[in-house]
Image (spheres, grey):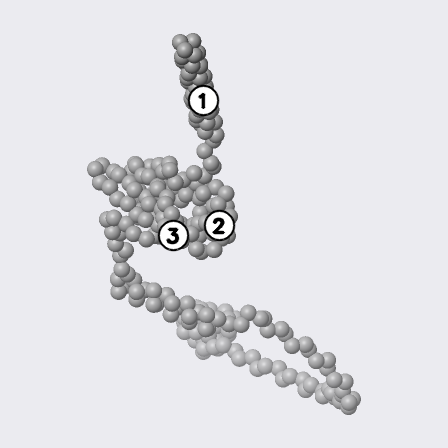
Amino acid sequence: MRAICSAALLLVCFIWAINAQAQNSSNQGNSINHIENTQHSRQQPQPKGSIWDEPIRFHTKAKDSCTMVISGQTNFTKLRVSCKSKGKSYWCDFLGKPNFCRSYNSNPRHFFNQIMWDMRKLHNACQGPRVYKPQMCRSASEEVQMAFHASWPKISVPKPTQTSQNQQKQQQQVKTSITTTKPPSHKQQPKPQQPAKAASKPAKTAVSKPVPPRKPAKTITARPTVAEEGQASKMAEEYCWKSLQGVCAYFISWFQN
């Protein structure tokens, strides 16, 4: 009887040792598989264009530190830009459907990087264009663009004054008047000259009439002036007799002319 009890006890101990060894081996196998899985997951690179977990960081021209966080909302993709500068903060939201662009689906992070390149050129990242459409999706539909939705603090858009409205109206009137009074572009072509018609009747020969000789022009003898007459009379008094002084003075004045 004692021999049977001792044999049964030995059998129980043997079975218990086998079970313990099997459990240890299974635990070791599970731990090894867990380590391999973690190593494999670490070795795997993150998918290209992951924008949901890691935000895009940049600085504006005024040295504001900003972050871009992208999230999905039903049919729209939401872009929130949050910035801080010298104890002040501001943010703005943009909505769009960039998934309609094939280039975006292949590399979505580059889509928002192009928006970031435009925002960092501004002093205030939320006071730039109201619509962003990156170059990589320029040929896509208008639904792809990210349009301004909301901001804090609110950005007040200045309303046009009356003077600016009047100037715009005057410019439009000038443009319409220029378009209405614009001359036609086609040039007037010169009319072709018609060939001269052949004369049906012979031309009459002009008979030249004899030209009468011209009469010679009468020569008018100029009378001597008073000064010449005075000199002639003096010479006549010196060289002629008193009875012939008048005739001498006349001839002397004649020769002087």
**Marks 1 and 3, how far apart at CA:** 46 Å
Left or right relative to 219: residue 33: left
Measured along the vertical axis of the image, is residue 56 above or below residue 10? below
Residue situated in front as seen by the camera: 31 or 147: 31
Given the current orientation, which residue lies at the most extreme top position? 3
Measured along the vertical axis of the image, is residue 43 above or below residue 108? above
Q: Amino acid at mark 3?
A: Thr
Q: Determine the residue positioned at 45% across, 77% down.
A: 246
Instruction: Tell me the crowding category of disc 2: few under 14, some 14 to 19, or many 20 or more residues within 10 angstroms, Cα based.
Output: many
**Marks 3 and 2, how far apart at CA:** 17 Å
Report x, y in % for residue 46. 45, 33
Residue identified by numbered label 3: 74
Residue identified by numbered label 1: 26
Q: Is residue 139 visible?
A: yes
Element assignment for label 1: helix
Instruction: Quadrant for the N terminus, please.
Output: top left
Report x, y in % for residue 91. 28, 45
Element assignment for label 2: loop
